[in-house]
Amino acid sequence: MSFYIDPHIHMISRITDDYQRMAYCGCVAITEPAFWAGFDRGSVEGFRDYFRHLTEYEPKRAAQFGIRHYSWLCINAKEAENVPLSRDVIAMIPEFLNKPNVLGIGEIGLNKNTKNEAIIFQEHLDLAMKSNELILIHTPHLEDKYKGTRMIIDMLKGDRRVKPERVLIDHVEEHTVRLALDGGFWCGMTLYPTTKCTPQRAVDIIEMAGTDRIMANSAGDWGKSDPMAVPEMIQEMKRRGHPESAIRKVVYNNPLTFFRQCSRWQDWPVEDSAATKKKEKVRVKGTERAIQ
Ligand SMILES: [Zn+2]
């Protein structure tokens, strides 16, 4: 079984059985970006409760199945038209930035590529730069995707404080993957049955763009989506004869390398136990020395 990380999934909208099935398939960690609730929230308090859910409750639910849960905070681009509310939320985010499972600011980006969305994107960016946080980016769907991705990359490049290796650009497709990679950014492919990329298309993209700085996620949410999409892509890579090392790189090592840039990231028990054994050895040696 291949261990994997799902770098983008909205577990708030999934049932507990999904955690169980993901664990059975080798999921060891997930990261959950803040997103739209399906309706516009009425106040900053609604976001404060949501961020508590992401940082307090969801990690405990995931832990029951041995899955590490991390999260990202922001106000989604769909709600950016309400500029005063967006600014209140951005001002409140720092209350949560030192929670142990927070990886940074996300998923920020554009939805309809409007002026207000761009303003709020840049204000999130400013917060991320001032607080030295990683960034997770949502790129628009379908016909807005290419233009939106270009606009986002222009804004990122326009801020000299931004280090591309600390930014993950998500929902890339065949026509946007190069924009992200050539700019030095990390990128994510979203395996989604309707508007985004199928596991087969994702493997086509890997074959076209290579395995460097690329990862895949299910983006499981309230819509028709599949939390088991990453294992499905693993199967497709195996079926096409990709070596285990390439699969592991895309679904495990790449997300790990990106997320480890956040000082709050902690590796899971598999690696923790190796470290513990090392410590025990040292302690035993010390005891022996004490006895002599
Ligand atoms: Zn999402």
Image (cartoon, rainbow, N blue to C red):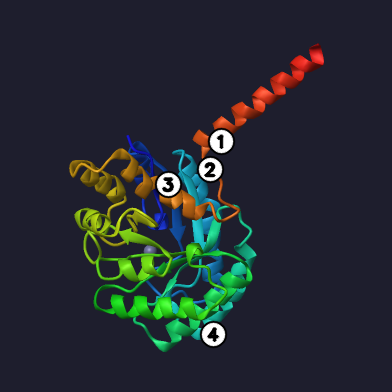
Q: Amino acid at mark 3?
A: Asn
Q: Are marks 2 and 1 in contact (CB under 8 Å)?
A: yes
* Place of residue 156 in the rendered image (x, y in percent of width and height, measured from the top left): 47, 76
Cα–Cα gap, marks 2 and 3:
12 Å
Q: Which secondary structure, mark 4?
A: helix
The percent coordinates of residue 6 (x first, y second) are 39, 51
Q: Which residue is situated farthest in the bottom direction here?
A: 115
Which residue position holds label 3? 253
Q: CA distance from mark 2 to mark 4?
A: 38 Å
Instruction: Look at mark 2 in the image and give the residue it sits on.
Output: 267
Q: Secondary structure at mark 3?
A: helix
- The image quadrant where one finds the C terminus is top right
Mark with earlier residue (3, 4): 4
Q: Can residue 42 be seen in the rendering of this structure?
A: yes
* Quadrant position of ligand 1: bottom left
Circle number at residue 272:
1
Position of 116 relative to 237 (above/below):
below
Q: Amino acid at mark 2?
A: Asp
- Residue, x 33% and y 54% (percent of image)? 216
Camera-nearest label, 1 or 3: 3
- Toward the viewer: 124 or 166? 166
Q: Is residue 81 visible?
A: no
